[in-house]
Amino acid sequence: MSVGQTVAAVLAVALAGLIVWKRRSIKGERRLLAIAAVLVLAIYASNVLSELPDPKKVIVDIAEALGPWTYALVGVMAFLETGAFVGLIAPGETVVIAGGVIAGQGEIELIPLIGLVWVCAVLGDTTSFFIGKRLGRGFLERHGPRVKITHERLSQVEAYFDSHGGKTILIGRFIGLVRALAPFIAGASGLAYRRFLPYSVVGTGLWSTIFCVLGYIFWRSFDRLADIAGKAIFGFGITVGVIVAVVLTYRRRHEIRDWLLAHERHPLIRPLFVLGRPVYRHLIAPLVRVIAPEVRFLWNRVTPGGLGLELTTTLAIGGVGLYVYALYVVILSGDPGLTPFDQELLDVANDVQSRMLTDVAKVVTDLGAFTTCAAVVVVMSIVLAVRGRISELLVLVGGFALIYLIVQVTKAGIDRPRPTDPLVETSGSSFPSAHAAYATVWIAAALVYTRRLGLASAALVTAAIALAAAIGLSRIYLRAHLWSDVAGGWGLGIGVFGLLTAITLVVEYMRHNGQGAEEPAARAER
């Protein structure tokens, strides 16, 4: 028995004796926590942990036994972590890394695994959010006092989530305890789901990708990777905690100062003033006077003002779109045959085929042709140029040009045959559908046009989305493309426009903040 195990055994015995001795005064949650601590110490002292099987061997055995069902196991665990609060008991990173390890062994594919974990994690967050929304504040008020959640603290939490809820969901995805509870508390605190979802999508997307890829790359040393990942997550949590503590201390600096001054003569406080005053007067104060303006200047340039939700939403949409495109690229690069729903949707199109519907589909599909969409871009560019909306103009023109380039490169790289007996003239590779990709220009143009016109213009955006969907489906109906071609085209177009919009938002806000920071300085010089 090692020294650590001996100490653990002594502590377990001492704690067990204390529970027996104080059994009348130690009740409820405290007793359960004490018993749990005794069990943990006893297990460690018994050396049982050292006899557990090698985690890498366990994962190899699981992969061989489950095969493709590994997807289901990892997806279910990713959902249960927040959807059923399993994350309070077991860290979700371990399961996700394990999935990446199994992908690294070649039993399953990495890209579909990332997508599955991503979707399941979002669904878990959503489930937890609506459980919190359904149970509501009353549930927290009834059961919160057991864990020191009072009415006043709930009010503070609601105010905090109203201002910083999105950031908590995004950053908290990488901190175990916060990840398990934040969606529930967000729902119970009254945070709107439309504000919650974009941060959840971005956070779970980053989380899924990082840990799946880590397992995939370093699968030969899984046990060491899991240990490093755990330490990294712990360090990240500590860092976030320190930053939060510093921010709170700074915001309450006047209260802290007043309290210290009121207790200046206390024996424990007096040495702080004796030592602190000279240090503050001769070192900290001069340093703050020199650094503060530079820090404020830099902060105004890296903080994108009030764009938080808009930026996160565009990142979420763009990330999902690019993932769908990349998923089909990876799948079809290995096998350009049929994928799920390809044949099924072609069969549906054959069943509903009629002369009138074919004529309508040909008209609709022409609205997604390169010349039609290019004309939309030209008209909108003129309108934007007249109004001085250069940023939106660059997004629209640059996005369309980039989509055209990627479509041509992808078609050349993936020589996929088209469906047989098309109802319109076709040429070239089937993947991706250029019409579906170009059709997203209608959505981008509608969003650009209505961005500053308010909610009354939502009908125009909805109509543009419906048109882009109809153009893609018309390609399937006319047997010009398969479902995967259309989905890949939609994903490419949405991903490109989403990413460019996010970049433009950051640049725009940084530029405006920079101008705002420079104006006071200019006035001071005058």
Image: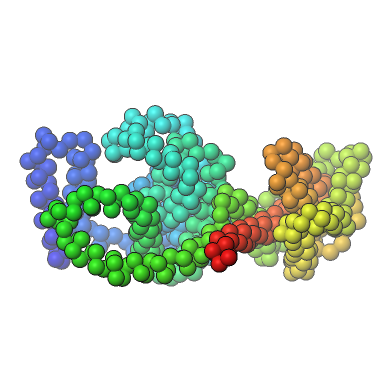
**Residue at image location 28% in from the left, 66% down from the top:** 280
Residue depicted at x 35% and y 38%: 153
Give residue 383's position: percent from left, percent from top: 82, 53
State the image quarter where residue 224 is shown. Answer: bottom left
Q: Quadrant of residue 218?
A: bottom left
Residue 369 appearing in the image: no
Report the coloring of the rendering: rainbow
Residue 429 location in percent, x, y?
A: 80, 63
Q: Single out the residue that lies furthest toward the front.
A: 526
Q: Nearer the viewer, residue 436 or 392?
A: 392
* Between 91 and 291, the one nearer to me in the picture: 291
Q: Indicate left or right for 284 with 497 as reference.
A: left
Q: Would residue 243 be seen by someone viewing this image from the given angle?
A: yes
Q: Residue at x 21, y 57 (%)?
A: 44
Q: Is residue 125 above or below residue 378?
A: above
**Most extreme residue toward the left, as rendered?**
21
x, y (%) of residue 462?
73, 41
Residue 379 pos. (x, y %):
85, 54
Tally of numbered tags = 0
Along the viewing direction, whichever of 65 and 303 lies nearer the viewer: 303
Quadrant of the rendering where the C terminus is positioned: bottom right
Q: The N terminus lies in which quarter of the figure? A: bottom left
Q: Residue at x 17, y 35 (%)?
A: 27
